[in-house]
Image (cartoon, rainbow, N blue to C red):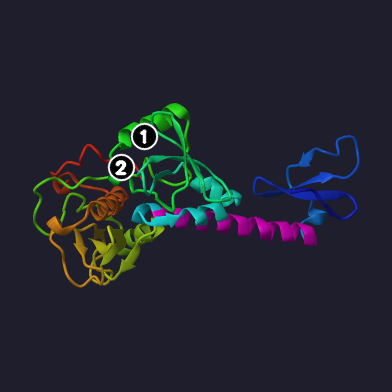
Amino acid sequence: MGWLAAGDTYEVALVEGRVVARSRSGKSPDGPVGDLPAEIRDHPEVSGLERFAEWLERHAAECAAQVTHWMVSSLPVPAALLARVWPDEAWRAVLRDVVVVADGPQVAGFLRDVDEEGGLRLTRADGGTVRLTPRTVTMPHPVLLPDLERLRAFAAESGVSQGVDQLHRATWHKPEGIDGGAVTEFAGAEYRSWYHLSFRATSLGYRVSGMNAVDRIRDAGRIFTASVGIGDPYTEEKAWTGALTWRDEDGNRALPLTDVGPVAWSEGMRMAAALHAGGTVAASRTPTASRPATADDGE
């Protein structure tokens, strides 16, 4: 974006998401001013650029949210759609280097480029490059990637930085032979109040419904509702994280753990772990179960 005149003395531009100004005369006409001079802060050109910067920020967040939704749900995405959005810098920033699996030959790789006709250029984990023209691609949830550790290693060696949280998203694999109807591994973390715990849940992107934090997860065409108890705001001064359970799409029927899909399991455990991490745990309330070695630290 070029420089726009803002009065007789200054011109302004949007640089890295921030409105900056420079003098239109003097020894260093190209030198940007750190802060906008007071006399032009209300200038129409400045106001217009600030609104545009806010729109760009919202647009980038919406692009990231959409790609994250495609990835968490492993939904098929038409290659023609990728071709339409690829020229947009915000879309390209979150799509580039996402691991995709093309239909047909089932080739997986890091998405590096998309041409106008929907042709894709992928870099495989062995460093090889392939060009494909698939009808659709999926951006698999990391728990579904059989070569996850290999892909992570290649990304680290190659300096790949993803715009969405895919390769380094915390994952949990459901243990073999597990039964019952609830997971208590992350129960017992104490918060000062229900409001602090509910705020933690909503700030992480989860929904609060009464006495539960919930997350609706698409897994192999099914919808699961993962729920973590967060207490009663009207009867307790403090709040504790409760058990993790899964229900059907409507949230009415409790599901046995054996019926929970791999993505629903991983995302439910991710929610429970994130809520647990925000509280404090007394020694007497520390869960005895250990976290699987496949889980990543942090949120």
Q: Earlier in the sequence, mark 1 or mark 2?
A: 2
The residue lying at 21 percent from left, 50 percent from top is 186
Using the rendered image of the protein, determine whether residue 229 is visible from the camera's viewpoint: no
| 142 lies left or right of 188 | right
State the SS at label 2: loop
Please tell me the numbered disc located at residue 145.
Answer: 2
When asked about the image quadrant of residue 253, the answer is bottom left
Residue 67: in magenta span: yes
Q: Which residue is mark 1?
A: 151
Residue contact between numbered discs 1 and 2, judged by CB atoms under 8 Å: yes
Quadrant containing the C terminus in the rendered view = top left
Mark 1 vs mark 2, CA separation in Å: 9 Å
Q: Nearer the viewer, residue 290 or 125?
A: 125
| 89 lies left or right of 257 | right
The residue lying at 14 percent from left, 44 percent from top is 289
Please tell me the numbered disc located at residue 288.
Answer: none
When asked about the image quadrant of residue 221, the answer is bottom left
Q: Position of residue 23 (x, y in %)?
A: 85, 44
Q: Position of residue 209 (x, y in %)?
A: 30, 69
The residue lying at 90 percent from left, 35 percent from top is 27
Q: Position of residue 220 (x, y in %)?
A: 27, 58
